[in-house]
Image (cartoon, coloured by chain):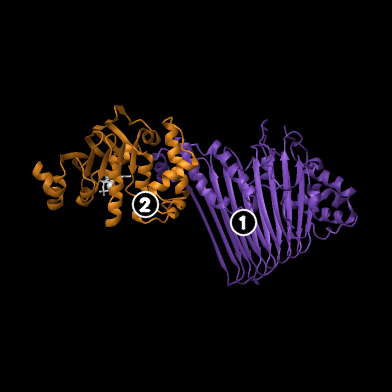
Chain colours: A purple, B orange
Amino acid sequence: MAKVVSLDNLLASVAARRSEAAPWLGALIDAASEKFAHVGLPNRRIEAWRYSDLAKALHETVKVESDLDAPPALAEACVAAFENGVLDDSKSSYCAMGAQSLRKVLAEKDSPFAGIIGRINPQADHPIINLNTALMEEGLVLHVPKGVTLATPLHLRFNWSGVDAASADGRHLRILVVLDEDAEATLFESHDGAPSFATVVTELSLAPNSKLTHVRLENFAAAARQTAATVGSVGEKAAYRGFYFSQGGHFARHEALMKLAGEEADARIDAAYMVADKRHCDNTTVMDHAVPNTTSTQVFRGVLAGSSRGVYQGCVKVAQAAQKTDARQLSRAMLLSHRAEIVTKPELEIFADDVKCSHGATAGELDANALFFLRARGIPEAEARAMLVEAFLIEAMDTVENEAMRAIVIACAHTWMLRHAGEASHVE
Amino acid sequence: MLEIKDLHVNVFGKEILKGLSLTVPPGEVHAIMGPNGAGKSTTSYTLAGRAGYEVTGGEIDFYGEDVTALSPEERAAKGIFLAFQYPMEIPGVSTMNFLKTAMNAQAKLRNEPELDAAQFLRTVRAAAKELNISEDMLKRPLNVGFSGGEKKRNETLQMALLKPRLAILDEMDSGLDIDALKLVAEGVNKLRAPDRSFLVITHYQRLLDYIVPDVIHILSGGKIVMSGDKSLALQLEENGYDAVINKAA
Ligand SMILES: Nc1ncnc2c1ncn2[C@@H]1O[C@H](COP(=O)(O)OP(=O)(O)OP(=O)(O)O)[C@@H](O)[C@H]1O
Ligand SMILES: [Mg+2]
């Protein structure tokens, strides 16, 4: 059984970490830990965590299943394999693309990344990012120089077998990806198994004209407790293309905190989440339009079964100077059960007057007429339901351009549907 | 052989069919006509097994078996096909994929071998061509953006591919132009066979010029109030339901 993560344990670990840190890192840790100690583990009294009470979730007991799904294998990728939160070089091939372990970078007296880590799109008051900064140990750093296009994707493969996952202060992973001008790269992040408590912070720096494709797959087991954040800055004419798939977990949250920092920067996120049983799945996005003429799009589609809970919080900020911002946001949820729940919270903070901002949220059930139509053609109910669920999500999954990745995503969706789509809401 | 005996059906607590009896022998085409709200679509949905159409009395025997307790898919596998008055648009499901899933599902339920990919394509293309359905339509999501007539042709295509023993056509002619009407009627006529029967629901004599019925029934107030040969349609066309039904009563 997992040990309870307490504030005291966490702060003791921070103190130990601090004493060994190089000065540049020590300064970072000090600032972060002071803020973290002040707020503690986020709970529902903090507005941004109102529907996702991490402190409470960490006190609940979870049972880790014995047969966990294996992590996906992406052919022709450089792999950084994290086993129970520790980078396993014997299973990795990231060196081939010039990436290096975070552990190595943090140990350096003077790192070229010292001025970058934690400073790409600073989140000074974010409790989890502060915790992560104070305790980060494992991770990866990738720098793609000017004009370089990485031909192979980088597969960040986080796998939690649940054996070593129990740790008094959790595991705190940090990924740093820096794209110089005109660089291009593809990140494939997969999260499998059941971390007892993990935080993952992925920092993305996109210089002008660069492009990052980021496919994230959270395929957790039911016991998983993780809160992750993708924190990025998108420069002039640079593009961020995110696709997120998630099945939730005991507590699974992912935040995309993107700053549109240069003119004509564009961030687009498509997401599909499928949540069953008593799982919790939180997607939070904050699009921060800082300069004129930037665009952002988020389309989140979720399917909720059992007595699961989905949360979508979408915030769009438009600074006073950010005229001609075009921001769109859409949340669509399909509830397969009367006990399932979706919470959507759009937030617009707009200080410019010449902007286009739209947001919409819908929640509904599987279309009974469509279901009858398919069944009347001889398609069994479970299969018909799965078809309609897939039809609902396919638009999102089709945005994954890389065929191998799309196939993995669709396979995950199929597995989920075999397990859950047949659950008939009307018998409950 | 379809034998409906003294069928009573409640829809959302309200009795709509009030003792409907009807027999359609194999190979025959029977038409059902009747005023709006008479219970024609209710009959077709009940035969297909739609949820919410509660059989409170009577039987639906299909080749000797009472099917009232069967699921829609089980009835489909037994050979009951409903061409919908308003075919559903289903975004995200390609027409091709839908046809394949339906054909394979029925084959499986009947313990027949599934078609391989090449056989399937050949069969669909040939059937689509006869109904003037383009490749492009087959690639589009099911019925999405199809015109009214295209939807009805698509229903006919499904019928041709699924080869039912009983086809219920609910207002197959609504929304069709003259050419499409002929096309659909030809499609139906081609499927006429000694072991296949049809229940054709319509408001208009015109469809019955193309699909000539063996018997015409008039459904009114949830019951068959009158049956006759195809001349009945002409009488209705001339005099209207009230006059014809009242004269008989
Ligand atoms: N879901 C429903 N809830 C309540 N009443 C219904 C429902 N569906 C049908 N009805 C009622 O049942 C009656 C029969 O309807 P039905 O659709 O079977 O008529 P119809 O003969 O097909 O008419 P039309 O010629 O207009 O297609 C109508 O009075 C209708 O209002
Ligand atoms: Mg009708």
Chain under numbered label 2: B
Task: Specify whether residue A306 is in view.
Answer: no
Of helix, strand and loop, which one carries label 1?
strand
Residue tagged by mark 2?
A: B151
**Amino acid at dot 2:** Lys
Residue tagged by mark 1?
A: A269
Q: Residue B85: x and y, percent?
A: 32, 48
Q: Residue A153: x and y, percent?
A: 71, 51
Q: Residue A149: x and y, percent?
A: 73, 59
Q: Residue furthest top?
A: B64
**Which residue is pictured at 36% across the width and 34% down the height?**
B75
Quadrant of the rendered image containing residue B192:
top left
Quadrant of the rendered image containing residue A169:
top right
Q: Is mark 2 within 8 Å of ligand 2?
A: no
Q: Which of the two residues, A47 or A286, is positioned nearer the viewer here?
A: A286
**Amino acid at dot 1:** Ile
Q: Do the numbered discs 2 and 1 sit on residues whose CB atoms are within 8 Å?
A: no
Q: Residue A14: x and y, percent?
A: 83, 47
Q: Which of the two residues, A346 or B221, is positioned nearer the viewer here?
A: B221
Nearest to viewer (mark 2 / mark 1): 2
How far apart are labels 2 and 1 at the CA level? 35 Å
Label 2 Cα neighbours within 10 Å, binned few <14 / some 14-19 / many ≥20: many
Q: Which of the two residues, B31 or B244, is positioned nearer the viewer here?
A: B31
**Which residue is pictured at 21% across the width and 51% down the height?**
B204
Chain under numbered label 1: A
Residue A136 in the figure: left or right of residue A257: right
Of helix, strand and loop, which one carries label 2?
helix
Q: Are marks 2 and 1 on the same chain?
A: no
